[in-house]
C-alpha cells in the first residue's frame, strides 16, 4: 500500500459528460434551466410552507427540510458541472474532491433518512391517527434534528475510508463529479478491500430502502382494513406523492449502484444526471401538484391576494 495520497495525487481529472464543445454549450443551457427551476421550486416550497399556517404540521415540516436537502444536494454538484462545460480540462483538487464526496454522501443519506421518517409519519397517521396526534408533534423536532447528524457521520466515515488510500494508478475519475464508487475503483489497495467498501455502500442503500418497503407494507395492510372505498382512496392519495418520490429516487439509485457491472466501470452518467440534477427539481412539483392540501393552501393564498388587491 502506498504511504500517502498527497504524494500520489494532488489533483483529479473528471471525465465529464462529453468532449464535444457544441454539445457542452447545449448541456450548459439545459443544466442552467433545470438548476434554476430546482432552486426556485425548492426555496419556493419552503417559503410557501412557512407562510401557510394550515401547513404547519409535522408532515410539511419534514417536507420543507426535504426541499432544503434537495436544494443543497444539487448545489454541491450542478454549478461545478456547469463551470466544467466551459473549461478545457475538468480538474478538481484533491481536497475539493474530498469535500464534494463528503457533502454529496451527507445529503444523500439525509434524504434517505428523511424519506424513511416521512414514511413512518404516513404509517402512524394512517394506522393510528390518535397516536399520531400525541407522538409525532412531540418528537418531530428531535427526529428532524438527528437527520443532519446521521448524514454527516456517514458522509465523513465513507469519505475518510475512500480517501485513505493513494490513487496511484490514475487520476482520471470516470464521472462528471466526485463520487465515492469510481474513486474507490482507482485506489491502490487489494481488490478484496475495495469490494468490501463498495459492498458497504450498496448495503447502506438497501437498508434504507428496506425500511421504506416495510413501512409501506404496513400502510398497505392498514388501507386494506379500511371498509369504505372512499376511505381507502383518501388514504392512498395521502401518501401518493411520497410514494412517487421514493420510486423515482430509489429507482435511479438501483440503476446507478446496485445493478451488476464489470470491474466497477460506471457507464451511468445518464442516471447520475437524473439523480443529481433532475430529481431535486422534480420533488417540489411532485409534492405540490399531487397534494390536495398544498393546492388548497395555494387557492386560499390566491383568494387572499385578490381580496387584498381589491
Image: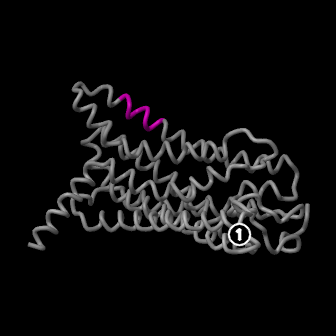
Judged left or right of residue 172, residue 258 is: left
Name the residue rendered at 39%, 68% in the picture: 43
- Looking at the image, the residue that sits furthest to the left is 310
| 298 versus 12 height, above or below | above
Q: Position of residue 136 (x, y in %)?
A: 33, 51
Q: Position of residue 296 (x, y in %)?
A: 21, 53
Q: Is residue 155 visible?
A: yes
Q: Which contiguous range is marked in magenta?
A: 214-221
Q: Quadrant of the N terminus?
A: bottom right
Disc 1 residue crowd, few under 14, some 14–19, many 20+, Cα 10 Å:
many
Task: Check disc 1 and report the residue beneath it.
Answer: 97
Q: Position of residue 162 (x, y in %)?
A: 75, 60
Name the residue rendered at 49%, 42% in the picture: 247
Nearer to me, 144 or 261: 261
Nearer to me, 38 or 85: 85
| 82 versus 131 height, above or below | below
Name the residue rendered at 84%, 74% in the picture: 6
Judged left or right of residue 178, residue 220 is: left
Judged left or right of residue 116, residue 128 is: left
* Main SS category, magenta section: helix
Nearer to me, 118 or 290: 290
Q: Of helix, strand and loop, which one carries label 1?
A: helix
Name the residue rendered at 48%, 45% in the picture: 246
Amino acid at each position: 500500500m502506498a504511504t500517502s495520497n498527497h504524494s500520489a495525487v494532488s489533483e483529479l481529472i473528471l471525465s465529464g459528460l462529453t468532449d464535444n464543445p457544441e454539445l457542452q454549450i447545449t448541456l450548459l443551457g439545459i443544466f442552467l434551466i433545470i438548476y434554476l427551476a430546482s432552486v426556485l421550486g425548492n426555496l419556493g416550497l419552503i417559503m410557501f410552507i412557512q407562510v401557510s399556517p394550515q401547513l404547519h404540521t409535522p408532515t410539511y415540516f419534514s417536507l420543507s427540510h426535504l426541499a432544503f436537502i434537495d436544494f443543497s444536494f444539487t448545489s454541491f454538484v450542478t454549478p461545478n458541472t456547469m463551470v466544467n462545460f466551459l473549461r478545457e480540462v475538468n480538474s478538481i483538487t484533491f481536497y475539493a474532491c474530498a469535500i464534494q464526496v463528503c457533502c454529496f454522501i451527507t445529503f444523500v443519506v439525509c434524504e434517505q433518512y428523511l424519506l424513511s421518517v416521512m414514511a413512518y409519519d404516513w404509517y402512524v397517521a394512517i394506522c393510528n391517527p390518535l397516536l399520531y396526534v400525541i407522538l409525532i408533534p412531540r418528537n418531530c423536532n428531535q427526529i428532524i434534528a438527528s437527520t443532519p447528524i446521521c448524514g454527516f457521520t456517514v458522509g465523513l466515515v465513507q469519505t475518510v475510508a475512500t480517501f485513505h488510500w493513494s490513487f496511484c494508478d490514475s487520476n482520471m475519475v470516470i464521472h462528471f463529479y466526485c463520487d465515492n464508487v469510481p474513486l474507490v475503483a482507482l485506489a491502490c489497495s487489494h481488490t478484496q478491500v475495495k469490494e468490501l467498501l463498495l459492498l458497504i455502500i450498496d448495503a447502506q442503500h438497501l437498508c434504507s430502502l428496506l425500511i421504506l418497503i416495510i413501512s409501506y407494507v404496513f400502510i398497505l395492510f392498514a388501507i386494506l382494513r379500511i371498509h369504505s372505498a372512499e376511505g381507502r382512496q383518501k388514504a392512498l392519495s395521502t401518501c401518493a406523492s411520497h410514494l412517487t418520490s421514493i420510486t423515482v429516487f430509489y429507482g435511479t439509485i438501483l440503476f446507478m449502484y446496485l445493478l451488476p457491472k464489470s470491474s466497477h466501470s460506471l457507464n451511468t452518467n445518464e442516471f447520475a444526471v437524473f439523480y443529481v440534477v433532475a430529481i431535486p427539481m422534480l420533488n417540489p412539483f411532485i409534492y405540490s401538484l399531487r397534494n390536495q392540501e398544498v393546492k388548497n393552501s395555494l387557492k386560499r393564498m390566491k383568494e387572499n391576494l385578490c381580496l387584498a388587491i381589491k
